[in-house]
Image (tube, rainbow, N blue to C red):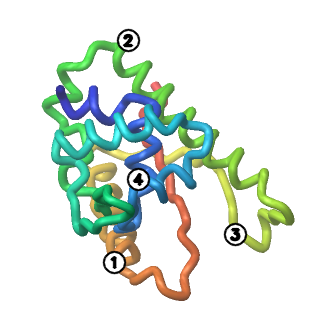
Amino acid sequence: MTSAELLLHPVRLRIVQAFLGDRTLTTGEVRELLPDVSTATLYRQVATLAEAGLLEVVEERRVRGATERTYRLRTESAHVGPEEARRLTPEEHRQAFTTFVAGVLDDFDRYTARPGFDLGDDVVGYRKAALYLTDDEVLALVDDLREVVSRRMSLPPAGRTRRLLTTVLLPDE
């Protein structure tokens, strides 16, 4: 199965997103984060991601005669590379983007369903900006963003709120 096939399945994408931020989770903890996904489906999709090497087992322990595994996302494996992306058809890209956007909408729905949510206090925002850039300038921008974001991705979770940063970069012509 290709990376695109693995990552662009709606449930598998949500599972992968649950692990972002270097989280370690058991399947039971993932189940708490995705309560609308049936237990059988969740266990099957976690197993698929683990077999493909996107999730790795970081701990195993015996619980009432069964083995409970704690997983971590192998972030270096959880992406669709440029060569694979070039091989996708326009319809496959539309499907992938729809899956991605549906995940963003799901994140926002979960946020707004929380009691007492406050976009201002929680520093929630969504915006669009138009930039006029050459190809070299957009590549430099991507490098700058990668550097800025990666420094913050390495911060430990203690005392911090997990926040999701979603970006989409498209030419407009």
SS class, disc 1: loop
Q: What is the x, y in percent for residue 124? A: 69, 62
Residue under label 1, please give it.
154
The three-letter code of the residue at mark 3 reads Val
Identify the residue under disc 3.
Answer: 123
Amino acid at the residue labelled 2: Glu
Label 4 close to label 1 by CB (< 8 Å) = no
Distance, label 3 to label 1, CA atoms, is: 20 Å
In front: mark 3 or mark 1? 1
Query: Does label 3 or label 2 sit earlier along the sequence?
Result: 2
> 65 and 2: which one is in front?
65
Query: On the image, which quarter does residue 140 sit in?
Result: bottom left
Quarter holding the N terminus is top left
Residue at mark 4: 27
Q: Residue at x 38, y 48 (%)?
A: 16
The circle drawn on residue 91 is 2
* Residue type at numbered disc 4: Thr
